[in-house]
Image: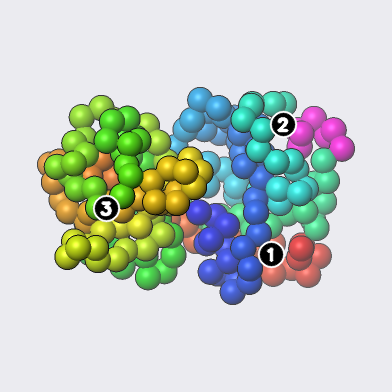
Amino acid sequence: MLESALAIATGEPVIRFSEQQVVDCQNWYDGCYGCSGGWPIRMHESTKQYPILREDSYRAYNRAENNCQIATNSGIDTSASSHLASVANAYEVTPTPAGIKEELCKGPIGVALQARGAFSSFGSGVMTSEDCPFNYGLDHAVGVIGWTVRNGIEAMVVRNSWGTGWGEAGYAYLALDTGNNGWGPCGIYQYLHSVDMDLSVYNNPDYRV
């Protein structure tokens, strides 16, 4: 989500951030727990103090929680030329179809939903609240990158992180309905947020990639 938000804000190509840095270093921040998960909005807020480095400046994701290389000063380049922009503001999105559509006109939305159950086995089509009851709780973070109409149903375009072999080439379509007592398919309306990027670092020539 941050990569897309930065690209939209600058009009420049997407640059990969280090997911591994988030796992290794942001787990000190309230609501961030390394490999044990955490709340995306809290991780985004933590970048105000520790901007995310490029993946090639820190290291690629390795599916493990390691010592923070920035904290230990173990050869990772933390100079200005390695940093990108951080988040200026992380905020909640109005949890309604209209609120989601309005925010998507600006950029992607970070969401948490219930992956356990129907969502994990999504294959194709549009998943509605009836298809995906919200009865376990939030346990997975994804991004909503747009909305469309499929088979006459307005649907959010959801980008997952489980590879292209899942869903429709890594994507799912969740209906913009208000079932599940207003929480929508898989509880997706319960936790919606977006960010404003802090470009003061990125726009400084000393910080450019």
> What residue range appears in magenta?
69-75
Q: What's the residue at 55%, 27% (across, down)?
A: 35
Q: What's the residue at 19%, 63% (across, down)?
A: 151
Q: Earlier in the sequence, mark 2 or mark 3?
A: 2
Q: What's the residue at 49%, 30% (across, down)?
A: 37
Q: Earlier in the sequence, mark 1 or mark 3?
A: 3
Q: Mark 1 or mark 3: which is in front? A: 3
Q: According to the image, label 2 marks what residue?
A: 68
Left or right side of 165 for 207:
right
On the image, the x and y values in percent for residue 26 come to 60, 35
Q: Nearer the viewer, residue 113 or 166?
A: 166
Q: Nearer the viewer, residue 38 or 59?
A: 59
Quarter-wise, where is residue 120 in the image?
A: top left
Few, some or many residues within 10 Å of mark 1 (<14, 14–19, 20+):
many
| 11 is higher (above) or lower (below) than 35 | below
On the image, the x and y values in percent for residue 118 come to 27, 35
Few, some or many residues within 10 Å of mark 2 (<14, 14–19, 20+):
some
What is the three-letter code of the residue carrying label 2?
A: Cys
Label 2 element class: loop
Label 1 element class: loop
Few, some or many residues within 10 Å of mark 3 (<14, 14–19, 20+):
some
Q: Earlier in the sequence, mark 2 or mark 1?
A: 2
Say which mark, if any, is on residue 125: 3
Q: How many marks?
A: 3
What is the three-letter code of the residue carrying label 3?
A: Gly
Question: Is 127 part of what is drawn in magenta?
Answer: no
Q: Nearer the viewer, residue 137 or 170?
A: 170
